Amino acid sequence: MASDSTPETDRDESGGGSGNESGGGSPDGSGDDSGEVVTLAHGAGGEAMRSLVDELVVPRFTDGDRTAGVGEGGVGLAALDDGAVHPIGDGSQAIVVTTDSHVVTPRFFQGGDIGRLAVAGTVNDLAVMGATEPLTLTCSFVLEEGTPIADVERVVESMRKTAREAGATISTGDTKVMGNGEIDGIVINTAGIAHVDAGDAVTDAGLRPGDAVIVSGTMGDHGIALLAEREGFDFTGDLKSDVAPVNDLVRAAMAAGEVTAMKDPTRGGLANALNEMADKADVGIDVVERDIPVSGAIASAGEVLGIDPFAVANEGKVVFGVDPGDADAVLEAIKDRPGGQEAAIVGHATEEHPGRVVVDTGFGRRYMSEPEGETLPRIC
Amino acid sequence: MSEETLQFRDPEQAEQLADRLEALMAEIDGSVNLMHVCGSHEQAIAKFGLRSMLPDGLSLRMGPGCPVCVTNMPEVDEAVAVAKQGAIVATYGDMFRVPGTTQSLADARADGARVEIVYSASEAVDLAEENPDEEVVFFATGFETTAAPTAAILVDDPPENFWVLSAHKYVPPAMEVVAEMPDTDIDGFLAAGHAATITGYGLFEPFVEEYEIPVVVGGFEPVDVMLGIERLLEYIREDTAGLENAYPRCVTREGNRAALETMWSVFEKTSGEWRGIAEIPGANLTLREEYADYDARERFDVEPETGGPDPLTEQCVCGDIMAGKADPDECDLFGEECTPGNPVGACMVSSEGTCKIWHEYGGHPDL
């Protein structure tokens, strides 16, 4: 999942749960008005979660001051971006901080595992803030009694490899064990810290009318692969999570041109990322559906499951807003890097329909709305 | 996606059909209301933005085509009551959050009841086999496409700890009720291709004859939908009522005879209330007496004390939407009190529900 600088409330990395997960709470969206108990809807990234964070958490932690804790020129909790930017010294330098908790079923899946997810998720949240050189990561485990030690070993090894791939270290952490049934297997919290020149920090709110919108690769891989695996669908074809660090891709893009906004399209997928970017910048976004890369296997599985690849999580992709004059150069730079071969310009920001995303389907035009609640398999 | 599928997603073909619709509407010289009777049609229309390709004066209305949406509140209450009596209730994913009078199955699960999502009737049987000491009840919903598989399970000696709570529905009588509604004013029906895969398109012959209204069976890719509309407009221009199969790659005149035989050996048609629409004679599928041993209504107390429904539901216009009389954004609750995360009406729950579809894709062509 994604990682906001917000306290984590999600429980499902796929962005498209099945309704089969164990655990308490109602996965429906009925909880946001009741004010009584947390439901799974509070972790699904929609309205319920937003009201929980916006109304209950942010005012208390920021005391109503949008720059609380980060000072002038910083990016604080109230921005609800992927991480916080703390200017230091004379303000020309900054520290970027992010944290994220990870739970996923199954914990080992095609293309990755919870350990890779935990490291990549945090590296990527730093990266999309413009901080592509992670200084270090932290790692806290909460383990359920009865979890095989071999599983833990496999997860730790995967974290080591992924950190090395991203050029990161893990330098501090914590381990707790809870009783059987008290939590679900392995929960990992990671935090990340990086140092940037303040001018290099990029938010998800910087899109300007005319900017090109670029995605770094195929959409929906993680969410659909996981949902298919969790439900025991034996699809032919290559359904694999895309979980990977993206800091190298981001570094290449930023070196090639002016990146005005960035977001990793994790929970809620591309639809969520684009809507959030449009909303925060108060611009419209027009995209062309056929220009958005989706692998054949993911598209077919999505059709069968009735799940939109644009509405589920990616764990190794980036959405960029780029100055129109630099779009081609940035695209070429991304395509040149591992994981970026399928990158594409998928649309542009516009002054029209501010806050909304409109899709040209090749037939007509429609909205691409923010996914709400968890995605459930359909009846027919 | 296969090449075969992609040809039905060819914008050029759709554009040519759009031109043809324009020409036909000019010849008809008046407004035309067409109704589709399937949530999957609404999905295709909204997802591909097809309404923005239609000529002025041509209106595509939504019919009672979402099995989740037409499942009546007391039927959900029955399933909740069974779950609260300790049985494992298995159901399709999009039934999970449909509000009953006071609770949905999701609410029941949050209260500790065991509710499981399944993709098929056979998965519900698997659940019964995996839990021999539990009672497993399949809350069976859907039209012919899911009723036939439910029937197939029951004729195949399911385990003794398995019961069916049938809320299956049969579409043709509902079309008759809508056709007879004086204020609905429908000029032609686009019938659901997948239901017709089971029933065959010949099923609609008496309907066309009695109501003198054209029916075209259509598929779900954008070119399929545009073609179905084009065929309907041809009939309307000629002022004739006819029946046509515009989905021949899946549908035959006779349908799937074996599936039909099995379905009618297990179910009989009874009268029942369709949520928000009307009491419809012959439109509910009830287990025949021979299958009473598997009937959850025989085994469990399914008449819960529920009290009155949430007052908000009184404002919900799902019934008018499914009868083709209103659009989702004409409902005061739409997108405000009623959202996919917090649905008031059933149309906001299922991916086949018109309100959910409009919430996701927008329904208006004026972009």
Image (cartoon, helix red, strand yellow):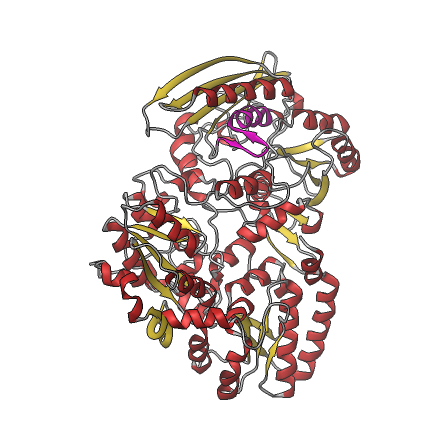
On the image, the x and y values in percent for residue A202 come to 63, 28
Tell me, yes or no, if residue B332 can be seen here: no
Residue A243 figure quarter: top right
Residue depicted at 43% across the width and 37% down the height: A43
- Between A257 and B300, which is closer to the camera in this rendering? B300
Residue depicted at 45% across the width and 52% down the height: B119
Q: Which stretch is magenta?
A: A107-126
| Residue A61 to residue A264: above or below | above
Q: Main secondary structure of the magenta part?
A: helix
- Between A312 and A295, which is closer to the camera in this rendering? A295
- Between B7 and A318, which is closer to the camera in this rendering? B7
Residue A360 shown in magenta: no
Tell me, yes or no, if residue A209 can be seen here: yes
Say which quadrant the C terminus of chain B sits in. Answer: bottom right
On the image, the x and y values in percent for residue B229 come to 62, 73
On the image, the x and y values in percent for residue A200 come to 67, 23
B97 on left or right of B240: left
